[in-house]
Amino acid sequence: MIVTVTPNPSVDVTYWVDRLKIGKETQEEYLTRATDSSISAGGKGINISIFLARMGLENIAMGFVGGYTGHVVLRALRDEGVTTNFVWTGSGETRTNLTVLEHGHEHVPILIDGPGVAVAESEMNRFMRRYRRMLKVAEWVVLAGSLPPQANLAFYHELTELAKQAGAKVAVSAGASCLTHCLPAAPNIIKPDIREHLSFEWMKLRTREEIISAGKRIVQGGVEMMIVSHEVIGDIVITPDSIWEISARVQTTQFRNLVGADDALLGGVIYQIYNGAGIEQALRFGLAAGILSAESPEKVCMDIGQIEHEMANVSLKRI
Amino acid sequence: MKVGEIMTRDLTSVEKDISVKELIFILDNAEMSNMPIVDEEGKLIAFISAKDVIKAALPGYFEMLHSASFIPDMNQFAKKLGQIADEPVEKHMHTDVICVEVDDDDLQAADLIIRKNLKSLPVVDVERRLVGVVRRIDLLHHLL
């Protein structure tokens, strides 16, 4: 069983517009009418859960939800066939994240993410009891996304330690500050969030060389795989034995919705490894899933056949 | 159809040592009228409903009355509810819990829900771990 944890989920609202004008441009109030819109459950772990469910893998999604939007998240997950095990918070609504995609410029979306709601100590304790229970059936745990406001940055560290003690493998996809705290627990896979300023305490991750250098240091500490999306259509993957560059032969202008593409990539890698595939197959499948998700208006790609077909466009180079 | 195909895949549940106040909070937010109670292994051990809490908070003589109209006002009820708010749910739960297994037929779940007048029914696996719930609406939704 795969268990995902999304501590700060969201309702993702996406608007497609022909032309977005903002007040600064027009010096007056301006109404932009969307040509289309969608609402979905969001947050990195939730996106991965939905991706895995669409690939036919049963999984359990955990985290915190609150208020009316909390119900929207749970309903969307259950409709996808994901089992839900969320703790209700009393401090407010699950956040809403907004994406605006302008026609012809979908590869540069406008993103506004809500901060989320703080979690009370009693709610955190309730979550930890449930998490320990879920570890009795978990083979993989995916910890993904930002933490709720005021949460302890060592949260993922504690969850990783508990999962490893229980014999589960752990993947963490988060911002650098959260990951830095988590590294001493040596998750099996880490994926830094490229949307945030990429730097670990001791090193910036701006160039290919800096990423490789930091990755080598990280895998020495026990992490088995670090995946960094260096360019939009390419990733650098560092393992204790090898360094890989994976890329896809696509134009970024083909992208229709980048939200969730990164999560489809990690979901694809985990899906393959969980099913016993080797690293090359897992990376090819993961990038193909990410690319197809980016090319689709939907957040994550649904079709395993399409992903397998797309793998032919992914090149993998050992460096 | 198997129960596993029609159930709501939700593991919302509580432990027997949580307070009645916490239970009410979760029932309210999750919009549930009853709650499975599990042990630290996730195995179903009991069940408690909002109705059980109401019964526990009613005055002792209520059972002897034919109608609630004999109760002067809600103050006594509120006072008693306040008294039991910090008690563990263990004190008011049912251990003779009715449930179905994930591979049971949907007809069996429907039969139990109708005969026992239940709003929902916990679903467990072969090791008695909670894996979901079947609600009345799940049956209706999948029969259409």
Image (tube, grey):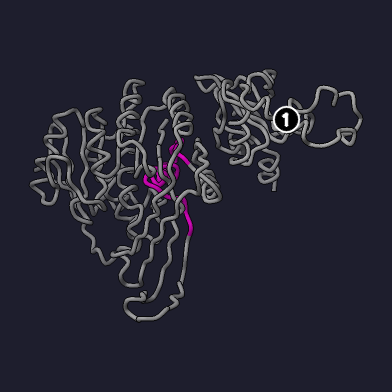
Relative to A172, is B144 on the left or the right? right
Name the quarter where the C terminus of chain A is drawn: top left
Above or below residue B76? Residue B142 is below
Q: How many marks?
A: 1
Specify whether residue B125 is in view.
Answer: no
Is residue B93 in the magenta section? no
Q: Which of A34/A156 is in front?
A: A156
Name the quarter where the N terminus of chain A is drawn: top left
Q: Give the class, few, some or many, for how many residues have Cα within 10 Å of label 1's Cα (few <14, many ≥20).
A: some
Q: Position of residue A152 (x, y in %)?
A: 33, 36
**Can you identify the residue that label 1 sits on?**
B79
Q: Residue at x 26, y 53 (%)?
A: A195
Q: Position of residue A137 (x, y in %)?
A: 44, 25
Specify whether residue B46 is in view.
Answer: yes
Q: Chain of mark 1?
A: B
Q: Position of residue A153 (x, y in %)?
A: 30, 37
Relative to B54, is B129 on the left or the right? left
Q: Residue at x 40, y 51 (%)?
A: A303
Q: Quadrant of residue A244?
A: top left
Q: Which of B21/B130 is in front?
A: B21
Above or below residue B91? Residue A293 is below
- Looking at the image, which residue sits at the far right? B66
Could you tell me which secondary element the residue under label 1 belongs to?
A: helix
Above or below residue A175? Residue B132 is above
Relative to A86, is B49 on the left or the right? right
Residue type of the residue flagged with mark 1: Lys
Q: Residue at x 17, y 46 (%)?
A: A199
Q: Position of residue A18 (x, y in %)?
A: 39, 75
Q: Which of B44/B88 is in front?
A: B88
Q: Which residues are magenta?
A: A39-64
Is residue A50 in the magenta section? yes
